[in-house]
Amino acid sequence: MTSSGGVAFSGGMAFPGGTSVSRLSVYSGTCAADGLAGGTPHLHTASTEAYVVVGGRGALQTLDVRGPRETELAPGSTVWFTPGTIHRAVNHDGLEVVVVMQNAGLPEAGDAVMTFPPDVVGDPARYRAAAALPAGASPEEIERAVARRRELAVEGFLRLAQAAAAGDLGPLRRLYADAVALVRPNVGRWRELWERNVAEQARHTAAVLDALEAGDAAHLAGSALLESPPEERWGMCGHLRAHDVTHPTVR
């Protein structure tokens, strides 16, 4: 793989830790189900996600086998949540977040599953139809589609949270099983992405440590400055300014 600057991409050129980074402006539109503004509840099946709050205020609603909880978010808040943690960003006032994702490439390849009701999540065709945003549509049409899928995911999330709060984890465990069934066909391709990015970066670091131990400075002569301009996207939780860290420009 090469960067747009023509220099070979390797573990030494990857974004630190094999992660990816984006800036998130959390959606301000309210949901009919509970009147809260914010994003679409979902979980990641393979990657840990981190929020570093840089502006505004809000909350993070989460659900796992320990039940539902809510964490207040304000500038300086830093939280992260592991695979299987359902999360929903709630926007109280201009919530702005820097998002750091583990396993750059996997979240972009679809390791997230939204909390649609079980009859949707359990049917791959219905799930894909509910999750998709219209290609080539106007911003207004896309915004309406984002709102529709958020409403559906909030409906499912509230059911899950209510059941878990009452001590019934059956619906959550069913969601986990359905989520794995949805993403399982993609795992072979994800493993290739992980090998080229995360695993390669770990191997590169091991080689650097070997060089340092041997007193070899050759790798320092291959140093570089890299850049990835932001790309505007419609995310699950808000408007994203994401960066393609697997194809950086070498300056």
Image (cartoon, rainbow, N blue to C red):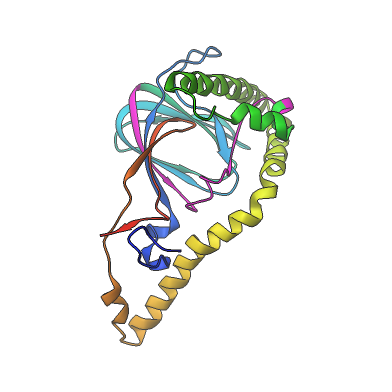
Residue at 54%, 63% (x, y): give it: 195
Callout count: 0
In the image, residue 16 lies in the stretch drawn in magenta: no
Name the foreground residue: 38 vs 79: 38
Which one is in front, 43 or 239?
A: 239
Specify whether residue 168 is in view.
no
**Rendering coords of residue 211 (x, y %):** 36, 82
Q: Residue 189 placed where, x, y %?
A: 61, 55
- Quarter assignment of residue 139: top left
Which of the pair 132/73 is nearer the observer?
132
Q: Does the magenta run of residues contain 105?
A: yes
Residue 85 vertical position relative to residue 38 in the rendered view, above or below: below
At x 50%, y 47%, the residue is: 48
Residue lying at the far bottom of the rendered structure:
214
Task: Name which quarter of the figure residue 233 lies in.
Answer: top left
Would you place residue 199 above or below residue 114 in this image? below
Give x and y (percent) for residue 68.
57, 29
Rendered image quadrant of residue 71: top left
Q: Relative to 147, is 123 above or below? A: below
Rendered position, 82 above or below 31: below
In which quadrant of the rendered image does the C terminus lie?
bottom left
State the extent of the magenta-drawn residues as a range: 93-119
Which residue is farthest front? 136
- On the question of residue 172 being in view, the answer is yes
Q: Residue at x 38, y 57 (%)?
A: 15
The location of residue 237, given as percent across then percent down, is: 46, 30
